[in-house]
Image: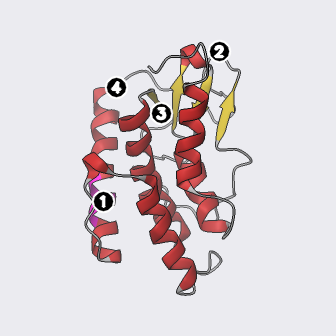
């Protein structure tokens, strides 16, 4: 599984959708539940964790991960001269998206939604009873493209608020 094989990646227009009965079909068909794809996904998360730890000299505790930790890494990248036009944005978007997906699944539940067994660009997490869908890789890409106003913490908190609105229950 990867995101870093593409020459150019466009910033998706959204990182969450609400009001839909099914996951968004505009990015392709939804794959049937597959233990193999899920295993590949969790292996990709472990690889991303290793790359982030090695590349940024941090130790991440995946069980207690917070989006704030990822935000700090991205802030440090921007402050040390990160340029999305010249940096390896696809690799960083993939790695940060993997960890952000793990955080959302661990903290908020939801149904992992795969559209490809090879690419994660449009992977999402869907809450059918809330009619809410989140795209963690879209958010990671936005945070790497836009220096101010896009944070992973606000993404997770916004989803949590939407899921906890009166009458809503966590999956």
Q: Which residue is mark 2?
A: 21
Determine the CA span between mark 4 and mark 1.
23 Å
Where is residue 154? Give x, y as percent.
59, 50
The dot on residue 114 is 3
Contact between labelled residues 1 and 3, with CB atoms less than 8 Å apart: no
First to last magenta residue range? 46-50
Q: Identify the residue position indicated by label 4 in the image.
A: 34
User: What residue is shown at x 55% (from left), y 25% (from top)?
Assistant: 164
Nearest to N terminus: mark 3 or mark 4: 4
Mark 4: which secondary structure? loop
Give the quarter of the figure containing the C terminus: top left
Q: Label 1: few (<14), some or many (≥20) within 10 Å?
A: many
Identify the mark at residue 49; answer none if there is no mark. Answer: 1
**Helix, strand or loop under label 3:** loop
Q: Is residue 154 above or below residue 150?
A: above
The answer to whether residue 18 shows anywhere in this view is yes
**Of residues 145 and 155, the one drawn nearer to the viewer in this rendering:** 155
Residue in view at x 58 percent, y 46 percent: 155
**Dots 3 and 4: beta carbons under 8 Å?**
yes
Q: Is residue 75 magenta?
A: no
In this view, the mark in front (4 or 1) = 1
Q: CA distance from mark 4 to mark 2?
A: 22 Å
Q: Decide: few, some or many residues near mark 4? Use Cα within 10 Å; few <14, some 14-19, many ≥20.
A: few
The vertical placement of 166 against 99, above or below, is above
In the picture shown, does residue 81 fall above or below 122?
below
- Circle on res. 41: none
């Amino acid at each position: 599984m990867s995101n870093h094989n593409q020459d150019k990646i466009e910033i998706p227009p959204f990182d969450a959708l609400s009001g839909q009965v099914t996951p968004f079909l505009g990015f392709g068909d939804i794959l049937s539940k597959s233990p193999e794809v899920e295993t590949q996904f969790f292996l990709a998360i472990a690889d991303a964790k290793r790359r982030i730890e090695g590349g940024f000299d941090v130790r991440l505790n995946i069980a207690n991960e917070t989006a704030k930790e990822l935000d700090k890494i991205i802030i440090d990248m921007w402050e040390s001269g990160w340029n999305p036009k010249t940096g390896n944005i696809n690799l960083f978007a993939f790695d940060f998206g993997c960890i952000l997906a793990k955080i959302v699944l661990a903290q908020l539940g939801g149904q992992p939604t795969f559209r490809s067994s090879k690419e994660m660009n449009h992977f999402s997490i869907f809450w059918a009873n809330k009619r809410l869908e989140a795209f963690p890789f879209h958010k990671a890409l936005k945070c790497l493209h836009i220096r101010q106003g896009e944070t992973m913490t606000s993404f997770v908190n916004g989803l949590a608020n939407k899921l906890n609105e009166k009458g809503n229950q966590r999956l």
